[in-house]
Image: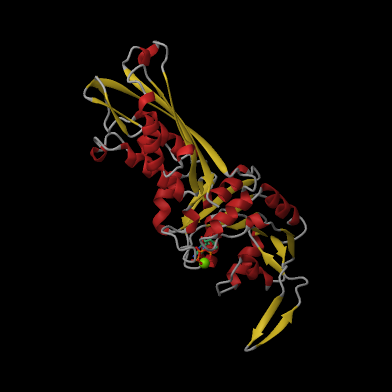
Amino acid sequence: MSIHAIVVAAGSGSRAGGATPKQFELLAGKPVYRWSLDAFRADTKVSSICLVLPAHTLDDMREALPHTGKIICIEGGRERADSVRKGLEALEAADDDIVLVHDAARPGLHQATIDQLLDALQTHEAAAPALPVIDALKKRNGANLTSLDRKDVYRLQTPQAFRVRVLRNALASSEHAFVDDLEAVEHSGASVALVPGTERLSKITFAEDFERVRRLMFPDAPSFRIGSGFDVHAFEPGPGVTLCGVFIEHEARLKGHSDADAGWHALTDAILGAAALGDIGDHFPPSDERWKDADSEVFLRHAIDLVHNHGWTLGNCDITLICETPKIKPHREAMRERTAAATGLALEAVSIKATTTEGLGFTGRREGIAAQAAATLIALR
Ligand code: CTP
Ligand code: MG
């Protein structure tokens, strides 16, 4: 007897209203569908997984997914029920096998739920996670309401687990598009077990559900982050250097594709780093002509906008400039003010320090300047 999973991810996510279907949006750093796919992958009892996808994503997804042999990708159908049918057909499943059918839009799947469903199938032909209804239930009839009895009324979630034979027969005899897979087997009189559902298994339906589900999945996630950045630029002949947005006349300038502002580059990396959004080179490749001689304020502001779009705001920053020359101290307050203006931080939240390396190393030999920065991000909620 083998255990299979079908993850339906072929919907268009129209109610969530994003540019891409909701199951491909990032949630806590992974595309939504990956959370439940990974939960099934990690379960050694599950021998095969069928991921049902929109046709236009198939090639890219086959390329992107780990080639473990455990996952097959197929094209979905018009309605969810069509996608489930296709998934079941694509799996090489025997009648006595077990299949778990799961919405990709429910990323909060835990091993414990899979285990409870499998336990329930020892004595039942189908099983699903369910939550009791807490709110009062009313049925509207024109201008009148009738109260419904909440007792024995449940909200059903997925995965829904079946003996393959039971689901196959139900799907074969049911023409219409049912809302979930249990609906198809209800009519067959199959015995159905309900196991405890959890709020974290909630479905992402509307745009606001992403944040709600993320919080349910990671209730202890801290509301702040810290990041660090480091940068070095070499001297070459020139009229002076730009550091933390301030031009300082000097016997040399800093070599680089942009204005080579090591202080703001380190800070940009610290901000990106706190949100785990890569580094300055990912966003502004030196090979791109657009960034030749660019003002580093552009990089800094872009990083701040980017983390803002990911739900963070800059809390404070602390930059250390490491060089023998030029002397930083006379320019320090101007640098703080420029940095506060560029980042939108209060002046008291911007620290700029300088140190030499006591004549040691490349900065000691006056070959260039190094900078390091730390930044905190505060969650916007
Ligand atoms: N689904 C599917 N094939 C379809 C329709 C839906 O595989 N033809 C999947 C969705 O990708 C989702 C799950 O079924 O994982 C639950 O459906 P729903 O929440 O309705 O998602 P969408 O249909 O994508 O969203 P909407 O109804 O808002 O368009
Ligand atoms: Mg739908």
Query: Is any atom of residue 7 visible in this view?
Result: no
Query: Is any atom of residue 170 visible in this view?
Result: yes
Give above or below for 61 relative to 86: above
Residue 299: % across, % down: 35, 40
Q: Residue furthest left?
A: 238
Scheme of colours in the image: secondary structure
Image position of 162 (left or right of 206): right
The front one of 54 and 245 is 245
Q: In which quarter of the image is residue 161?
A: bottom right
Q: In which quarter of the image is residue 334?
A: top left
Which residue is found at the position 45% from the left and 39% from the top? 347
Give above or below for 79 relative to 94: below
Which residue is found at the position 45% from the left and 59% from the top? 21
Residue 284: % across, % down: 32, 38
Residue 333: % across, % down: 39, 32
The front one of 134 and 196 is 134
Which residue is found at the position 59% from the left and 68% from the top? 171
Image position of 194 (left or right of 107): right
Which residue is found at the position 51% from the left and 61% from the top? 207
How many numbered discs sit on the rendered protein? 0
Residue 166: % across, % down: 66, 64
The front one of 287 and 54 is 287
